[in-house]
Image (cartoon, helix red, strand yellow):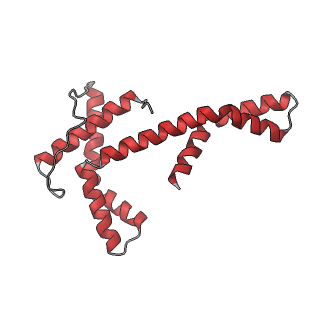
Amino acid sequence: MFLRKLAKYARDETEDLWEEKVDKYLKNGMSETEAKHRANRKLRDDELDKFMWKYANLVHYILQLRVGRLHLKVVKFIEKLVQEGTEYKKAIKMAIRKYKNELDNYLDEVIEEEENGEEEEGDDDDEEEEGDEEGGDDDDQEEERKMRTLMMRRRKKRRISY
């Protein structure tokens, strides 16, 4: 289950601190089992905060992807491949490769903006455009630009309250 992986990632972030606490408790005469248990209890709130932050970010990105035209094209292609009998992992890899050039454009734009010290202005958070999912018209590019802007703005905030 993916949420268990997120929880593990949150615990992994506190691994060094956990080891320090266990060592401290061992030096104070606790048994190894008791020291580990106490370190787990002490770090529980911090790990829960990290887990919730990771999950909130994931949900945020998923919601953004639901309106992104490129993502919709990728998903549609994956679903087509799976219906034809391709395994999910292989279908995902094939879809990502198919849209490699469009994905590369995102990276180019981010690099260019960073090099030029640009940050796009505007508040496009709630705007959704409709159109042909397969089209390569200007509306597709505009929607993708808006999503990139939104993603960049969110990344700069870094913190999501929950």
Residue placed furthest toward the bottom: 85
Q: Residue at x 20, y 39 (%)?
A: 127
Up the image or down, 68 lies above or below 31; here it is below
Residue nearest the viewer, comparing 15 with 112: 15
**Residue at the top extreme of this rendering:** 117
Given the current orientation, which residue lies at the most extreme right position? 29
Name the spot of residue 72 as percent of width and height, x first. Answer: 26, 55
Quadrant where the C terminus is found in the figure: top left
Give the vertical position of 97 relative to 149 (above or below).
Answer: below
**Near-viewer residue (160 or 25):** 160
- Is residue 127 shown above or below 73? above
Percent x, y for residue 79?
A: 31, 66
Q: Residue at x 25, y 48 (%)?
A: 68
Quadrant in which residue 14 is drawn: top right
How far from the left and from the top, in percent, is residue 107? Answer: 30, 41
Query: What is the x, y in percent for residue 110?
Result: 29, 36
Q: Which residue lies at the image location 57% right of the left edge and 37% below the top edge?
A: 48
- In the rendered image, the vertical position of residue 114 relative to residue 104, given as above or below: above
Seen from this angle, which residue lies furthest front? 162
| 121 with respect to 90 (left or right) | left
Q: Residue at x 41, y 70 (%)?
A: 87
